[in-house]
Amino acid sequence: MEGVRERRLEALLLQALKGERTLEELHAVLKPLHPGLTKAHLFALLVRLKREGKVAFQGGRFRLAGKDQGADP
């Protein structure tokens, strides 16, 4: 069942990344929804998602990959 928990955490994380957030901000948002979550585990998940091209990291903040950053409409 660990795979189900991991997929649920991944879905919550991607949902939390609608805007740019730091590791600390993400941890504060996800900790109540996923008890026992450590920053190390969260960072490892973010690194995996970055390798898969789902998450981008720039300037100390994580965001969804491919999302336009700061372009004026």
Image: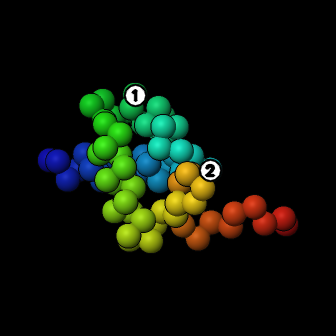
Residue 72, by quadrant, is bottom right
The local crowd at label 1, few if under 14, some if 14 to 19, many if 20 or more residues have their Cα within 10 Å, is: few
Q: Return the residue nearer the eye: 73 or 4.
A: 73
Residue 52, by quadrant, is bottom left
Q: Looking at the image, is 26 positioned above or below residue 60?
A: above
**Residue picked out by circle 2:** 19
**Horizontal arrangement in the rendering, residue 17 relative to residue 8 (left or right):** right
Residue at x-position 39% and y-position 55%: 46
Q: Return the residue nearer the eye: 16 or 46.
A: 46
- The three-letter amino acid code for the residue at tag 1 is Pro
For the residues labelled 1 and 2, say whether their Cβ atoms are less than 8 Å apart: no
Q: Return the residue nearer the eye: 71 or 2.
A: 71
**Horizontal arrangement in the rendering, residue 19 relative to residue 65 (left or right):** right
Colour treatment of the image: rainbow
Residue at x-position 31% and y-position 36%: 37
x, y percentage for residue 10?
A: 37, 52
The CA span between labels 1 and 2 is: 19 Å
Q: How many marks?
A: 2
**Quarter of the C terminus within the rendering:** bottom right
x, y percentage for residue 32?
A: 40, 28
Q: The residue tagged with tag 1: helix, strand or loop?
A: loop
**Residue picked out by circle 1:** 32
Residue at x-position 30% and y-position 29%: 35
- The three-letter amino acid code for the residue at tag 2 is Gly
Mark positioned earlier in the residue sequence (1 or 2): 2
